[in-house]
Image (spheres, grey):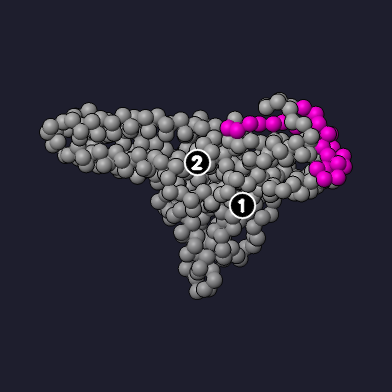
């Protein structure tokens, strides 16, 4: 990423709007700001300025202008923000004027945030939190993303790194000064073991993926058990085709849903049965895989046939039919009358909360957990080492894992994938 170039972009929502913010960042940001606003205010102060075309002098808008000096800006570079009126014509005119200034170019998606990362304003975990915050659709997603974006995990990692550096310093001192290299100060392996145990405890916590992507709630059971009707009753509209012909659902159908701020992926599956129909057989096979991978299983059918799942809600469907006796341990539900649907959702919500992070907890994503796991293994190896040199090597490997965790080592492909998730101007 060439940081010698100065970039600009609309950083607020698409016009029309009351106010639109155009951001400029890079070594020529102040010069570009002067070219269009004639005079910039003091750093971190707002002032009203006439925006004029740098070449023709044509009046473009009256705007609030802010100036930021490196490194005390969001990107760590010189920056200018133009708070314009939010009409399309105004924004287009300002963007066109900036495009005509030599040395400026439009920003790529995520480029402002990437420069903030590369200039040390944020670390990779905070950037991941910002990406999740932009995509957040529920209150729980917003809170979890905000905890990352505000540096919650970064502060925890810094505390781990401080302990790790103390252990490494002790190991290096022992190598340099202890005459008996085979002797290890008991405090070193003990410290390694304690830090490894703490990392393992973090790895056992619920991950962020079910919260970010949605808790996988799969509705399973035999053919014609009322699965599709139940999903339509839950979402309040006809999202799934319903007939009295067994085998109507041949492939899984996924419906996004928010339950008390928790995102769900409610999935209808093909009815489980023996079939000679090749297409239906594929659907039945997929249904089995989806049930195995489900975070929560809603089972319609005989309780004795229910999958051995750790979080299963057994449902006695079509309870409005008088000739159907409720099975023990199952929840009576009628898709026709709505009876039991609220109780079913309450039970699903209870299970869903066990697979997502607590509201005030910092959750790891898959990438972060992988590097925390690498550090834990290295520390466990160090704790069991019978030689101080091997112990020091384990500590070095753990430090490298933490560097990858914060994005300070060997992650160019991860960075490209992450910042491509950002919108233009962020």
Q: Residue furthest right?
A: 58
Residue on which the image places disc 1: 255
* Image mark for residue 383: none
Could you classify mark 1 by the number of other residues whose Cα lies within 10 Å: few (under 14), some (14-19), or many (20 or more)? some
Residue 190 location, x and y as percent? 24, 31
Q: Earlier in the sequence, mark 1 or mark 2?
A: 2
Residue 346 horizontal side relative to residue 104, left or right: left
Q: Which residues are magenta?
A: 47-71
Residue 76 visible (yes or no): yes
Residue on which the image places disc 2: 124
> What is the CA distance from the residue labelled 1 to the residue labelled 2?
32 Å
Q: Main secondary structure of the magenta part?
A: strand
Residue 312 horizontal side relative to residue 77, left or right: left
Q: Is residue 31 magenta?
A: no
The nearer-to-camera label among 1 and 2 is 2
**Hey, which quadrant is residue 267 in on the image?**
bottom right
């Amino acid at each position: 990423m060439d940081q010698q170039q100065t970039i600009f972009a609309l950083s607020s929502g698409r016009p029309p709007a009351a106010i639109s913010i155009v951001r400029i960042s890079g070594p020529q940001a102040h010069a570009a700001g002067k070219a269009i606003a004639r005079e910039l205010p003091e750093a971190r102060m707002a002032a009203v300025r006439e925006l004029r075309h740098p070449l023709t002098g044509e009046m473009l808008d009256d705007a609030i202008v802010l100036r930021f000096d490196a490194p005390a800006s969001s990107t760590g570079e010189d920056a200018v923000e133009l708070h314009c009126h939010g009409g399309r014509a105004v924004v287009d005119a300002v963007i066109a004027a900036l495009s005509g200034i030599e040395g400026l170019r439009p920003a790529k998606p995520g480029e402002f945030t990437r420069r903030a990362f590369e200039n040390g304003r944020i670390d990779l975990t905070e950037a991941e939190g910002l990406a999740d915050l932009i995509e957040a659709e529920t209150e729980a997603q917003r809170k979890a993303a905000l905890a990352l974006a505000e540096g919650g995990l970064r502060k925890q990692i810094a505390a781990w790194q401080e302990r790790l550096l103390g252990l490494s310093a002790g190991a290096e001192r022992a190598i340099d000064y202890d005459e008996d290299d085979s002797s290890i100060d008991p405090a070193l392996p003990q410290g390694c073991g304690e830090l490894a145990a703490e990392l393992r405890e973090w790895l056992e916590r619920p991950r962020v993926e079910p919260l970010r992507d949605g808790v996988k709630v799969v509705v399973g059971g035999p053919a014609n058990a009322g699965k599709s009707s139940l999903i339509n009753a839950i979402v309040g509209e006809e999202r799934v085709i319903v007939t009295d012909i067994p085998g109507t659902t041949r492939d899984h159908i996924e419906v996004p849903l928010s339950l008390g701020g928790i995102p769900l992926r409610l999935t209808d599956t093909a009815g489980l049965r023996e079939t000679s129909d090749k297409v239906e057989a594929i659907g039945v096979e997929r249904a089995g895989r989806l049930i195995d991978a489900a975070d929560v299983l809603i089972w319609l059918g005989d309780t004795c046939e229910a999958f051995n799942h750790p979080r299963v809600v057994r449902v006695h469907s079509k309870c409005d039919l008088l000739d159907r006796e409720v099975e023990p341990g199952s929840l009576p539900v009628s898709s026709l009358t709505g009876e039991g649907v609220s109780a079913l959702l309450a039970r699903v919500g209870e299970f869903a909360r066990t697979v997502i992070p607590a509201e005030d907890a910092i959750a790891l994503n898959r990438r972060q957990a992988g590097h925390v796991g690498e550090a834990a293994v290295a520390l466990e190896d160090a704790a069991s080492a019978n030689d101080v040199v091997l112990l020091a090597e384990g500590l070095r490997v753990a430090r490298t894992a933490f560097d990858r965790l914060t994005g300070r080592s060997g992650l160019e492909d991860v960075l490209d994938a992450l910042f491509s998730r950002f919108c233009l101007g962020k």
